[in-house]
Image: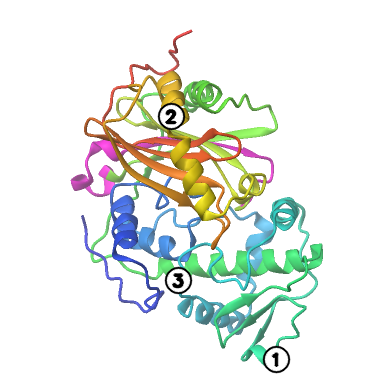
Amino acid sequence: MNNYNLNKGLFNNIEISDEMKEELFENCKNGKRTADVRFKHAGALTALLIAALVGGTGVGATAYYQSVMKRMESMPQEEVKEYVQDINNDFSVTISGSWSRQLTNDESLRLAELERKYYGENLFPEQEVQHVKTLSEWDGKSVCYVEEDNLLHLPDAEMSNDQLLMFIDYSAKKDYVIEKEAEKIEPEEEVASPYVDVEDISEDELIERGREYLVKFLGKDLGNEWHARVEAFKPSESDPSVGLTHDSYTIYWEQEGATPNSTDYVVGFGMHKLDFRFVAVRGREHWATLKSYTKEEALKKGESDEAKVFKQLHEMFGLPEEPDVVKKVEAYQDYSEGDDCRQIRYIFKYGDNPVDILWDLADEKLASVEICGNMDLGYELGDFDE
């Protein structure tokens, strides 16, 4: 692995556990585009790690439309400096850790819809998010960044659509500046991009085969309003020490005007053997539709649901009826903190092969399955048992 200089000052103050740090670095090093296939928008820390570990290519999760890109590029330099300061003072690790409160389910659903209009229909807010130095300067009713505690403060009352648009605009600009700052991190040596053209199979074939897996494993037969795209990620091209096993194809299904918080579906295959790797439904919009549990309730239900998870893995993926080892059962909180839990993450081992699971608690359905080892599931591309 090529060594990169991380001591650029960006995000140096972020404090995370050694376990989380190790997992983030290992996942990035092993060729996952974001820190984890489950993450749709992995946040500032992961953006930096990806920039450092895979050479700064494909850092951003946001696909900017031309009009939005013009808006980003036309920011005054003073405004850009404010965002750089916000980023450098951001101690958060979770996506929402830099906000004063969590979004409600209704706000999350309206957010995804307004984002589609922001990116696709040029629906921009009339006002900017305010920046103030001290908490006493905030009126308590507006969307406002406070330097004193380095948080984006949201009103206690449910945000209006206008306030949500300001929130979207702030987040888009912050993401844009994160990407631009990450691009300034120079590798010690030139490396090739890990993103390549599709090889030895057509994109249409990958999409059709991926669709079969999506239907079989998540029960989703998506209509024409969902657009598919293919990403060929070949880290062995830029760093042979990574190994061929991490080269992969990912097929994304996104609705028209897909945005960072909208629901999408992904299926992944190994690039060289076209072996199944992962399937997932992701996004804050999906999260907002799930029932909330306390952490204690979630862990208790997660333990009692294990037999149901084993059964679905056996019936859908052809795995043994029970794993050899249960490595981890934890309440998963990609879009929340505190006592708001909606999914359980399991890591099982079948022989030497880890299988990483996300389980929607209320629906009792698999939301994400990632085969981390070289396990032969007995499936050829597009070939399923009846």
Q: Does 193 sit above or below residue 206? A: below
Identify which amino acid the numbered label 3 is placed on.
Glu
Q: Position of residue 83 (x, y in %)?
A: 56, 77
Q: Residue at x 75, y 77 (%)?
A: 142
- Disc 3 and disc 2: Cα gap in Å? 46 Å
* Closer to us: 336 or 364: 364
Q: Is residue 38 visible?
A: no
Identify which amino acid the numbered label 1 is placed on.
Glu
Q: Secondary structure at mark 1?
A: helix
How packed mark 1 is, by other alpha carbons closer than 10 Å (few <14, some 14-19, many 20 or more), is few
Queried whether the magenta region covers residue 154, the answer comes back as no
**Residue 307, disc:** 2
- Disc 3 and disc 1: Cα gap in Å? 29 Å
Residue lying farthest to the top in this orientation: 386
| Residue at image mark 1 | 137
Q: Residue at x 34, y 31 (%)?
A: 270
Q: Which residues are magenta?
A: 236-259
Q: Does 336 sit above or below residue 85? A: above
Image quadrant containing the N terminus = bottom left
Instruction: Please tell me which of labels 3 and 2 falls first in the chain.
Output: 3
